[in-house]
Image (cartoon, rainbow, N blue to C red):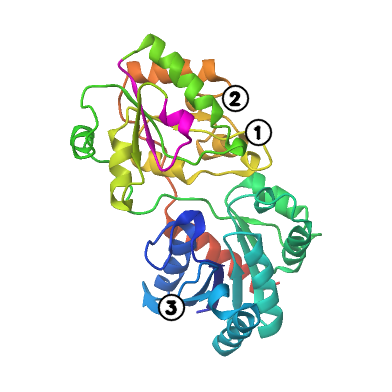
Amino acid sequence: MMRILFVAKRQPQQRDLIERPYGRFYHLPAALAAMGHNVHIQLYSHRKMQSVETLRDGVVWTSLDVRMLGLHALLARAGQEATTFAPDYIVGCSDAWYGWMAHWLARRSGARLAIDAYDNFEAYMPWNLPLHWKWHAALRAADVVTAAGPQLAARLDGYRLGRMPTVIVPMAADPLFLPCDRIAARRELNLPVDAPLVGYCGGWASNRGTNVLIEAFRKVRSARPEARLVLTGKPPSHALAEEGVLALGYVKDSQLPKVLSALDVACVITADTAFGRYSYPAKLCEAMACEVPVVATGTDPVRWMLKDDQHFFVPVGNASAMAKSLLARLANPTRIQYPQLPTWNESAAHFEQALVHGREH
């Protein structure tokens, strides 16, 4: 059994981990606790949120807010908690700041250091060179580094200077993502029962290549005027104004599998950017878990996730190719049995093996 302390931000991808269990930030620690390890997680925020300590799924969760405590008091408290817990490993995850924080805490407490990355964190704030230097230092110092896929692993290995190679810990779908009845899901969400439905549930940003989606949908509508584009979250105004768009806004976590199951085809869009070249979309895992056909831009990480099956891919930024593929999927709206996805429990087993191997070197 190991004593493992994770450090992460409290609200990764706008999900408050205290209130809304989500993704690798929650399920990897929980799965490790289920294996018998003693797992704590320190969460950090900057939104004047009260400090919290709770036990859930076998993990001790604490949350500290820099605007409530002040930086000096937060660092002192975090350091004291880490020293008192005396972990075998401190694991930095969620972004580059927490690689730095884990490195600082590991030096203070004498613990081994592990870093977990699911994206190219340097793409988030390309101007913040001092943070990048701290991130690189944490990678060089880490006893163990894990990454969501091989492209990101190769990038991180470039900073490791001959240390133990980065271990792949794949993304997975959260347990609530299971196939739902399509017609029942449409009725519950007030979506048209008979219309061809294309959907996109990801974020909107220039580094994600989402500009191609609306152009592709216009081409789909020229051939299938009855088609609709279902969007969740907060799309930009020009997307909301597009004819044929059905905007659901932010939906409850429990409804997300129903949104996906209601679709005839889901779009997964990434771009050939510093972000997209190392992005392993959770939304792709979720669509696959719900057995929804996807049309995906063919970046290397997405190709790896889909085992390079050419049926799913369109060239990056090519609206005509995307429209053609969408129309082909709409002409044959059947569910797909994908190759077996990894689960968070399986990914946690890979993570555990990496930590054990790191203790031996």
**Marked residue nearer the N-terminal end (1 or 3):** 3
Which residue is found at the position 53% from the left and 15% from the top?
320
- Amino acid at circle 3: Val
| Residue 252 visible from this viewpoint | yes
Quarter-wise, where is residue 141 in the image? bottom right
Q: For the residue labelled by badge 2, is the local secondary structure a helix, a strand or a loop?
A: loop
Q: For the residue labelled by badge 1, is the local secondary structure a helix, a strand or a loop?
A: loop
Q: CA distance from mark 1 to mark 3?
A: 40 Å
- The residue wearing badge 1 is 272
Quadrant where the C terminus lies? Answer: bottom right
Looking at this rendering, what residue extends furthest in the bottom direction?
84
Count of numbered circles in the view: 3
- Amino acid at circle 2: Gly
Left or right, 146 with respect to 323, comes to right
* Cβ–Cβ under 8 Å for marks 1 and 2: yes
Q: For the residue labelled by badge 3, is the local secondary structure a helix, a strand or a loop?
A: strand
Tell which of 195 and 138 is nearer to you: 195
Verify whether residue 32 appears in magenta.
Answer: no
**Marked residue nearer the N-terminal end (1 or 2):** 1
Q: CA distance from mark 2 to mark 3?
A: 44 Å
Tell which of 254 and 50 is nearer to you: 50
- The residue wearing badge 3 is 52
Which residue is found at the position 45% from the left and 37% from the top?
235
Quarter-wise, where is residue 116 in the image? bottom right
Q: Which label belongs to residue 6?
A: none
Looking at this rendering, what residue extends furthest in the top direction?
223
Mark 1 is surrounded, within 10 Å at the Cα level, by few (under 14), some (14 to 19) or many (20 or more) other residues, namely some
- The residue wearing badge 2 is 317
What is the span of residues highlighted in magenta in the rendered image? 226-241
**Marked residue nearer the N-terminal end (2 or 3):** 3
- Amino acid at circle 1: Asp
Left or right, 100 with respect to 46, comes to right
